[in-house]
Image (cartoon, rainbow, N blue to C red):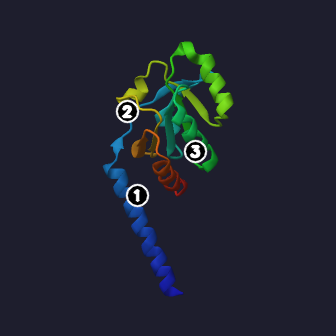
Amino acid sequence: MKQTRIITLITLIVITFLFTLVELYAKKAPPIALKDLKGNWHFLSKMVKKNPVIVSFWATYCVPCKKEIKMLKEAKISIPVYYINIDKSSDLEKVKKKIKDWGIPHTILLDFYQKTIKRYTPNLVVPSTFLISKRKRVIRKIEGFSEKKLQKFIKYCKKLK
């Protein structure tokens, strides 16, 4: 019984140390200041106040984006997910239709001029998904769609909160 407690304590200390180490060497997340569909502003500093967050860039023309959104939705991750659409403002009705058709359940932010995505992934790769810590560090990222990588990403995210 005593050995089990000691092993559990040591395991927790090691896991905490590893998370801290990852956090120290992670890249600082670029700022986010975008509006949602209702015109409300969202800022990275407020998004990560209580929890780490997932930020996922997507576009209506991106077929793999639909698969990624579906996987993230079905994973039922307990941390907030922000989907950032990069279509032009002239495509807003198309964006709203895709949101409804794809059943995107979380907050949708709009990056009409693609300024934010360029800070995260300069080559405008979609889908691109980032896990951002409370300290505004990118601790995990996936650029492009890979089911295997996304499953690992989701598994890691489920351990957080």
**Residue 80 numbered tag:** none
**Dot 3: what SS?**
helix
Q: What residue is at 53 percent from the left and 15 percent from the top?
A: 89
Q: Quadrant of the N terminus?
A: bottom right
List the residue tagged with mark 3. 72
Q: Amino acid at mark 1?
A: Phe
Q: Identify the mark nearer the N-term, 3 or 1.
A: 1
**Labels 2 and 3 touching (C-beta < 8 A):** no
**Dot 2: what SS?**
loop
List the residue tagged with mark 1. 19
**Residue 121 numbered tag:** 2
User: How far across and how far down the image is residue 11, in percent?
Assistant: 44, 72
Determine the CA span between mark 3 and mark 1.
22 Å
Taking depth in this image into account, of 43 and 80 the one nearest to the observer is 80
Q: What residue is at 41 percent from the left and 32 percent from the top?
A: 125
- In the image: residue 29, left or right of residue 51: left
**Dot 1: what SS?**
helix
Label 3: few (<14), some or many (≥20) within 10 Å?
some
User: How far across and how far down the image is residue 73, in percent?
Assistant: 62, 43
Determine the CA span between mark 2 and mark 3.
20 Å
Number of numbered discs on residues: 3
Question: Foreground mark, 3 or 1?
Answer: 3
Taking depth in this image into account, of 29 and 61 the one nearest to the observer is 61
Taking depth in this image into account, of 75 and 137 the one nearest to the observer is 75
**Labels 3 and 1 touching (C-beta < 8 A):** no
**125 is higher (above) or lower (below) than 17:** above
Q: What residue is at 48 percent from the left and 54 percent from the top?
A: 152
User: How far across and how far down the image is residue 120, in percent?
Assistant: 38, 33
Q: Identify the mark nearer the N-term, 2 or 3.
A: 3
**17 is higher (above) or lower (below) than 138:** below
Q: What residue is at 57 percent from the left and 47 percent from the top?
A: 79
Query: In this orientation, does residue 94 appear?
Result: yes
